[in-house]
Amino acid sequence: MTRPEIRTQKRVIKTLQSLGYAYLGDWKERAGNRGIEEGLLRTNLGERGYTPAQIAQAVQKLLAAADSTGVTLYGANLRTYTLLRYGVQVQVEAGTPHQTVHLIDWERPERNTFAVAEEVTLKAPGAHGRRPDLVLYLNGLAVAVIELKRGSVEVADGVRQLITNQEPIFHQGFFSTVQLVLAGNDSQGLHYGTVGTPEQFFVRWKGLANAGPAKAPQVDLSEGALLDGPLREMLAPERLLDLMRNFVIFDAGLKKVPRLHQFEGVKAAQERTRRREGGVIWHTQGSGKSILMVLLAKWLLEHEPDARILVVTDRDELDKQISDVMRNTAVISRDAASPRITSRRELLEKLASPQQRLMCALLHKIDPKDLSGTLPTVTGRFYVFVDECHRTQGGDMNRQMRRWFPDAIFIGFTGTPLLRKDRQTTREVFGTPIHTYKFDEAVRDGVVLDLKYEARTVPQRLGSPQTVDQWFTQKTRDLNAYQRAVLRKRWANLEELMSSGERKSRIVANIIEDFNLRPRLISERGTAILVAASIYDACHYYRLFQTTELAGKVGLITSYQPNHNLISREPPGSDERYKFDTYTRQVLAPGQTTAAYEDEMKRRFIQEPANCKLLIVVSKLLTGFDAPSCTYLYLDQELRDHTLFQAICRTNRLDGEDKEYGHIVDYKELFQNVQQAIAVYTSDELAVDSGGEDGNVFLKDWRVEGRSRLDAAWQELRYLCEPVPAPKTQEAYISYFCGDVLNPAALAETEPLRIAFYKSAAGFLRAYGEVAANLSDLGYGPDDIARLHGDSAFFAEVRASIKRASGEELDIKPYEQGMRHLINTYVQADHARELGALSGLSLLESIVETGINDVIAREIN
């Protein structure tokens, strides 16, 4: 038996009535239907004790705010929401104080009137008529519009109706008070957005009990279960009020409401903060952590009068992004001082003063060096939000933050799973996970796009080994054996890691081919990022693209800052000169700074993709850079773990129907790394919090391993240096490990001893460097820590002195130009070709749905 739409509509009305909504009737033939039903509003305000004069002024101001004549719907909706949210200021008589008329009673839900009308015919002068299926009224104000479809009709039809209804030629003015627009049917459930939400950003409310595999309930087979259950959850009076009050934001021209995972994340964080506890929110890349942070910040600042928030990041790009979002969403007002902290002095001043309640600071503004110094004056109850917390949480920095903010609640935000030693440190610093939302969940929810991976190989081979041998024989004839070995090793590394000029040219040609063949790139709506292995390679790629059709539409974003003082000692033709010349002669306009250049190229990339089609980067922009136009990522650098996943997710943002996937093109044959990164971002082996422990992937206890390595290396080095005669000065070490430095026979005789010292010192310094910030965590006392600090500095200097004295330190720079010439001349490259047959599958299809992700995660664990 078929189920007509009207049957679904009547059932939904009964569901709403069961929640406490009054039925206003069928308004198909009713004249004058409006978004503000004055009679209903005046009745409710009167019942709540407002005088007729107060009501008259409040209604008049509300009608004026809701009038969309001459303004955008966004502007009218923002004005109206402000009055709904904070009340209307009225003055009944001149000279008397202003009073606030609250159009909605947020604190006592039972004092509000919830109602539903069906078939609400909308007519306006000069506009075409429309008839929404259901309209929800709150105290006579239209706050939600629902379009219903039969189960055999695509729910997107209802979404498109909701969007077109908001156009001026239909009934734009009706939507000035509307907060939620919903479309649903009995087969696809309930999808929702708000005023102005584009079609691709409507998402499904899966149901709070159905928001993750670990919480899946028993299957409900009753009629309407897929639609009515989410409706009951979302539109229950108290939740509707909560959504309207605490989860609506206006962000630089776009009104937004949370996706389900953001709503759940905020609610879970609210519960934690009520208990004065912190924790970690892990939501995958691209799923909207910044909005979640905004929603939580707004709630805390409003509900705790003395609450103050410090947002800490480790990268300028993230700091700017978060502070901009906080301002755009009115967490701080437009005329307020910038939340960004520019210096350590400014941070100390603002911590002591309660005026600025929200601040954004880079991590280095908190100095971890003096752990026993004078503490800053801190006023207020602080919440410290740490973005990408897995990178910044440990050691002296954490101890200093805890000293500065002993009573603060720390909340970590990350888009990356907690791997290896991150897991234990994160748990100690922030607490247990607050909420988790993994990559595969986000893809299935339509929050981010799936990724397609394509491996392409550009084989290289050495064309003339004899010429290379002759060059080395000529160039190294005056070097000793050790220096020749250093130069040969450098050549081997260059040959392995560097792209020859011919290989880069092949890759450039391959990328240009994509821009001429791939629909998304041809349309000029899509852009790409090329990740180069080094700043030199990035500069080389930039120059190569200047001879192609993309000339003038390619940007170069690296950490390089051209400084003529730094190249004054560089030989002509060196790598440093090449980078300097690229930036000063080809990249930067006269008088332009790199910061201004990069800001402009990023702006074009995001806002004008036809004018900046490709960005060449090394490490910048691989995190915290959101550009929906970015569709292709070309990898010509070895990346792993967090960095790899963050990089490939630059392409997963939604951006219209013509962008179906993010595309990863790999020239480095990194599929195993990609597979592992996807696995640890999706596996159910991760983020299981049971019995006080979570199941995040990790290897070994890093404290035990770190201390064991450091103790062994320290003991070995001290044993090796024991025979050095007192007073163990640098001269004594040089004498012991070199003999007479002017006597070649003595140097040859002591060479094995020196090599043993070099290896031992390198092992000690490496082991020390890995745990230097966490020595007290490893159980070392103050005296041992001081000795370790001293020994590390001393042996680093002694090693360098011995190498200089023995002539075994070689300045590679004079040889770099020649070796690069050899690579560009004699290392030949073939045309790029596809490697394997993975490009037809998405990464979820090839890794997650096969179960490989869980297998890999278990292996790592």
Image (spheres, grey):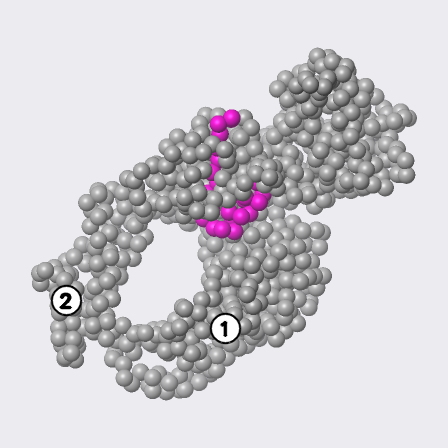
Q: Residues within 10 Å of mark 1 (few under 14, many from 20)?
A: some
The image shows residue 590, relative to residue 388, as above or below, that is below
- Which mark, by number, is residue 731? 2
Closest to the observer: 838 or 193? 193
Visible in this render: residue 845? no
> Where is residue 4 drawn, in percent x and y?
83, 32
Query: In the rendered structure, which amino acid carries the disc numbered 1?
Result: Asp
> Where is residue 100 drawn, in percent x and y?
67, 21
Instruction: Give the spatial CA distance, label 2 vs label 1.
Output: 42 Å
User: Is residue 701 in the magenta section?
Assistant: no
Secondary element under disc 1, as helix, strand or loop, is helix
Q: Tell me which numbered mark, 2 or 1, is placed earlier along the sequence.
A: 1
Q: Which quadrant of the structure image shows residue 104? A: top right
Residue drawn where x is 56% and y is 33% of the image = 298
Closest to the observer: 665 or 599? 599
> Where is residue 486 drawn, in percent x and y?
31, 74
Which range of residues does the magenta coloring cover? 304-326
> Where is residue 489 drawn, in percent x and y?
34, 73
Closest to the observer: 212 or 256? 256
Q: Residues within 10 Å of mark 2 (few under 14, many from 20)?
A: few
Secondary element under disc 2, as helix, strand or loop, is helix
Where does label 1 land, which residue? 581
Closest to the observer: 705 or 94? 94
* Label tally: 2
The image shows residue 328, relative to residue 834, as above or below, that is above
The image shows residue 246, relative to residue 458, as above or below, that is above
